[in-house]
Amino acid sequence: MIQQATDPLSDVGLEGFTAGTLVGQALKLCPLPVKRLCLLQKLREQSSVFDFPLVFDPNKQQASQQVFRVKVTDRGVEDIR
């Protein structure tokens, strides 16, 4: 169920939502039946999610240096300031 703009804010599950969005975007780029190699390649080719830049490197596993607070509503992802 999509959270309505008037519902109380919750940041529970944002990381999972973001990971799911990345996988969903990659899956759309692979022909059926989806092969593991295609999925991994398309995941690595993604350069951003919700305008947040991504860099994939097997030797560097660095989290963001900033905390971005957003809310996901029926209108999309919105900044919380």
Image: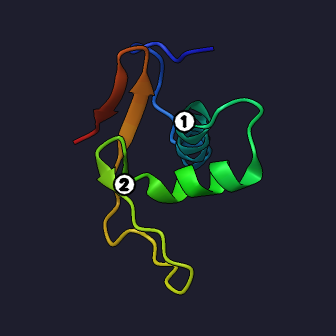
Measuring from the top left, give residue 44's x and y in whole percent: 51, 60
> Which quadrant would residue 2 be assigned to in this image?
top right
- Residue at point 35%, 47% (across, down): 69
Lower position in the chain sequence, tag 1 or tag 2: 1
- Residue at point 22%, 42% (across, down): 81
- Residue at point 45%, 30% (across, down): 9
Measuring from the top left, give residue 23's x and y in whole percent: 61, 43
From the viewer's perspective, is 47 left or right of 17?
left
Three-letter amino acid code of the residue under disc 2: Ser
> Which quadrant would residue 26 be assigned to in this image?
top right
* Disc 2: CA contacts within 10 A as few (<14), some (14-19) or many (>=20): few
Measuring from the top left, give residue 4's x and y in whole percent: 46, 12
Label 1 to label 2, Cα distance in Å? 14 Å
Q: From this view, report whether residue 34 is shown above or below residue 75.
A: below
Q: Mark 2 points at which residue?
A: 47
Q: Give the secondary structure at mark 1.
A: helix
* Disc 1: CA contacts within 10 A as few (<14), some (14-19) or many (>=20): some
Q: Give the secondary structure at mark 2.
A: loop
Q: Residue 12 carries which label?
A: none
Q: Mark 1 points at which residue?
A: 29
From the viewer's perspective, is 35 left or right of 19?
right
- Residue at point 39%, 60% (across, down): 54
**In which quadrant will I find the N terminus?**
top right
Three-letter amino acid code of the residue under disc 1: Leu
